[in-house]
């Protein structure tokens, strides 16, 4: 039942959009990326000190850049430019893209059931939020597409290097490297858009503090720790199907924090997405159970 555990980091990540809009509205995405990654990495380093070997610095820097640096920036651009539910539901395209990349890179053809479920997820998501009836930000949509690509490539890289490096070292140092990569980029951006940074820092409040504690502590330190641990124990495609918890979190937090509202038909579609996402795992578990019960 790793799929259930895979839903935990996905749910935590799904809260990013609403939590950012509610507590950190208007903050520069690059600044948020640094403040999300570095404190989380330092916290994990404090809990269990680790130091990469000389041979592992380069791959850790690579996944830190892809998985943390670029990905975090995309997530915060989405959080600042798109409705929280749209951001969460839009990421449901990840399983389909993951299946295609897994097929092309590793030559692993997805089962017909997973293909059907992946298509079903896209259809339900399309019906849930029809783009023709919603005006969406172009930069936000581009950030969403890039975030999907980063998540899949970063997961493949993490799974590969995780065979030779302890998972705690992987999660700790990808956060640290990702945060450090963002610092010079954020400084350059701050020199060109000083007002946004000054306003964020000068108007700092307890509400901002709670938002940063959430996105850096629970959302990142806990979420990414569980993510790297799980990615060594299940396939990328199976892990991405656990991402159904992402839109559930986005929609729920949108209701509670941002007063977003939905029709009964939309809630039915949400339930359909949950069932579709879990279907491959449920059928696979039942098949394994039957094989176990058969006389040898």
Image (spheres, rainbow, N blue to C red):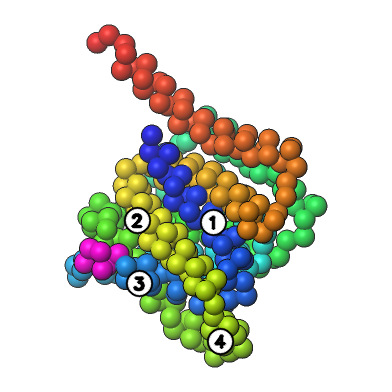
Q: Is residue 56 visible?
A: no
Q: Which numbered disc, 2 or 3, marks the residue that appears first in the sequence?
A: 3
Q: How far is mark 4 from mark 2, CA to CA? A: 32 Å
Residue at image mark 4: 202
Does the residue at mark 4 contact the one at mark 2 (Cβ under 8 Å)? no
Give SS at disc 3.
helix
Q: Which numbered disc, 1 or 4, marks the residue that appears first in the sequence?
A: 1
Q: Which numbered disc, 2 or 1, marks the residue that appears first in the sequence?
A: 1
In the image, residue 46 lies in the stretch drawn in magenta: yes
Q: What range of the chain is rendered magenta?
A: 44-49
Predominant secondary structure, magenta span: helix
Q: Is residue 253 left or right of residue 65?
A: right
Q: Position of residue 122 (x, y in %)?
A: 63, 42
Q: Is residue 9 visible?
A: yes
Name the mark on residue 15: 1
Residue at image mark 3: 177
Q: From the viewer's perspective, is the residue at label 2 or at label 3 nearer?
A: 2
Q: Is residue 87 left or right of residue 167?
A: right
Give SS at disc 1.
loop
Task: Identify whether 151 is placed above or below 81.
Answer: above
Q: Residue at x 54, y 43 (%)?
A: 244
Q: Residue at x 44, y 51 (%)?
A: 9
Q: How far is mark 2 from mark 1, CA to CA? A: 17 Å
Q: How far is mark 1 from mark 4, CA to CA? A: 26 Å
Q: Which numbered disc, 4 or 2, marks the residue that appears first in the sequence?
A: 4
Q: How far is mark 1 from mark 3, CA to CA? A: 24 Å
Residue at image mark 2: 225
Q: Residue at x 42, y 59 (%)?
A: 218
């Amino acid at each position: 039942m790793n799929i259930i555990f895979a839903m935990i980091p996905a749910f935590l990540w799904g809260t990013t959009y609403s939590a950012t809009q509610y507590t950190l509205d208007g903050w520069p995405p690059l600044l948020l990326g640094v403040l999300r990654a570095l404190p989380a990495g330092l916290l994990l380093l404090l809990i269990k000190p680790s130091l990469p070997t000389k041979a592992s610095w380069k791959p850790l820097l690579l996944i830190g850049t892809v998985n943390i640096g670029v990905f975090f920036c995309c997530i915060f651009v989405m959080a600042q430019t798109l409705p929280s539910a749209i951001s969460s539901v839009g990421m449901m395209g990840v399983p389909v893209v993951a299946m295609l990349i897994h097929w092309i890179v590793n030559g692993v053809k997805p089962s017909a059931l997973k293909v059907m479920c992946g298509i079903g997820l896209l259809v339900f998501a399309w019906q849930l939020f029809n783009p023709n009836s919603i005006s969406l930000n172009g930069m936000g949509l581009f950030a969403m597409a890039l975030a999907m690509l980063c998540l899949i490539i970063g997961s493949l890289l993490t799974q590969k290097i995780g065979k030779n490096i302890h998972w705690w070292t992987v999660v700790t140092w990808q956060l640290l490297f990702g945060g450090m990569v963002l610092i010079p980029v954020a400084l350059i951006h701050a020199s060109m858009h000083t007002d946004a940074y000054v306003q964020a820092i000068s108007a700092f409040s307890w509400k901002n503090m709670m938002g940063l504690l959430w996105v850096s502590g629970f959302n990142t330190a806990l979420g990414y720790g569980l993510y790297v641990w799980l990615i060594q124990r299940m396939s990328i495609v199976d892990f991405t199907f656990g991402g159904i918890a992402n839109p559930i979190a986005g929609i729920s937090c949108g209701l509670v924090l941002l007063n977003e509202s939905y029709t009964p038909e939309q809630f039915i579609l949400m339930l359909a997405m949950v069932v579709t996402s879990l279907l491959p795992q449920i059928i696979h578990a039942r098949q394994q159970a039957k094989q176990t019960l058969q006389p040898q």
